[in-house]
Image (cartoon, rainbow, N blue to C red):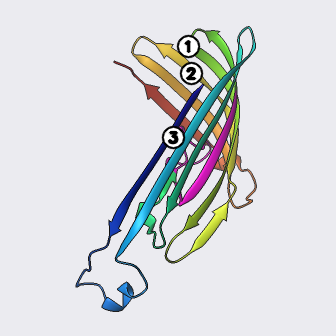
């Protein structure tokens, strides 16, 4: 079991740029408090002799009245939401859930099938968008002398689009510890 929680609070200051029209600054606070909260948790549940169930959740929340696109959380890809390009989704609030069934054929090597889903909100100065994307697929991880190599094939859907094999993603990962 692994749980990590972080909270940061600070003062956000926006400096005026003379090259930008002064009227654009009228609708935003040049000085405001911004809070960033992150919570991550994982649980490994032994099922049978060589089978394990992984449950993982990642969550983030940004609080500020004038968020810009470059300040948002970026997620998607191998570590957060498989079936999507790396960090292709942006959000002021998000929560993801991964359910992965692993068959261990060696101590640190396995085959897996998974389902992952998310809910996110993107609340900025100009817009509000929310969605429930999801992905599913299969993969494997191999423990080698130089580290852990993983490969997954995943299909994903966002904004209620149909699943398309043309949009499938192959995710590669390599983890090395010193």
Earlier in the chain: of badge 2 and badge 1, it is: 1
Which residue is tagged 3?
5
Residue 37's label in the rendered image is none
The relative height of residue 88 versus residue 24 in the rendered view (above or below) is above
Q: Residue at image x 69%, y 48%?
A: 134
The relative height of residue 50 versus residue 87 in the rendered view (above or below) is above
- Categorize mark 3 by other alpha carbons within 10 Å: few (<14), some (14-19), many (20+): few
Q: Residue furthest left?
A: 18
Helix, strand or loop at label 3? It is strand
Q: Is 10 on the left or on the right of 18, as rendered?
A: right
Quarter residue 104 falls in: top right
> Nearest the camera: 14 or 20?
14
Q: Are marks 3 and 2 in contact (CB under 8 Å)?
A: no
Q: Is 139 on the left or on the right of 27, as rendered?
A: right
Q: Is 177 on the left or on the right of 89, as rendered?
A: left
- Categorize mark 1 by other alpha carbons within 10 Å: few (<14), some (14-19), many (20+): few
Which residue is tagged 2?
141
The relative height of residue 133 versus residue 109 in the rendered view (above or below) is below
| In magenta stretch: residue 79 | yes
Percent x, y of residue 42: 61, 31
Q: Residue at image x 56%, y 33%?
A: 3
> Nearest the camera: 19 or 151?
19
């Amino acid at each position: 079991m692994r749980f990590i929680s972080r909270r940061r609070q600070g003062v956000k200051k926006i400096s005026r740029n003379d090259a930008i029209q002064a009227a654009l600054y009228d609708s935003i606070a040049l000085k405001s408090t911004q809070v960033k909260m992150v919570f991550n948790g994982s649980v490994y549940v032994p099922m049978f002799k060589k089978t394990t169930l992984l449950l993982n959740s990642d969550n983030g929340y940004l609080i500020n009245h004038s968020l810009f696109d470059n300040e948002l959380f970026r997620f998607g890809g191998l570590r957060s939401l498989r079936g999507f390009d790396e960090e292709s989704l942006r959000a002021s609030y998000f929560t993801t859930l991964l359910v992965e069934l692993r068959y261990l054929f060696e101590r640190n090597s396995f085959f897996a099938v998974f389902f992952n889903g998310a809910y996110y909100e993107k609340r900025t100065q100009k817009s509000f968008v929310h969605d429930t994307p999801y992905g599913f697929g299969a993969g494997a991880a191999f423990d080698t002398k130089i580290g852990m190599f993983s490969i997954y094939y995943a299909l994903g859907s966002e904004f209620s689009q149909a699943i398309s094999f043309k949009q499938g993603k192959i995710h590669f990962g390599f983890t090395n510890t010193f």
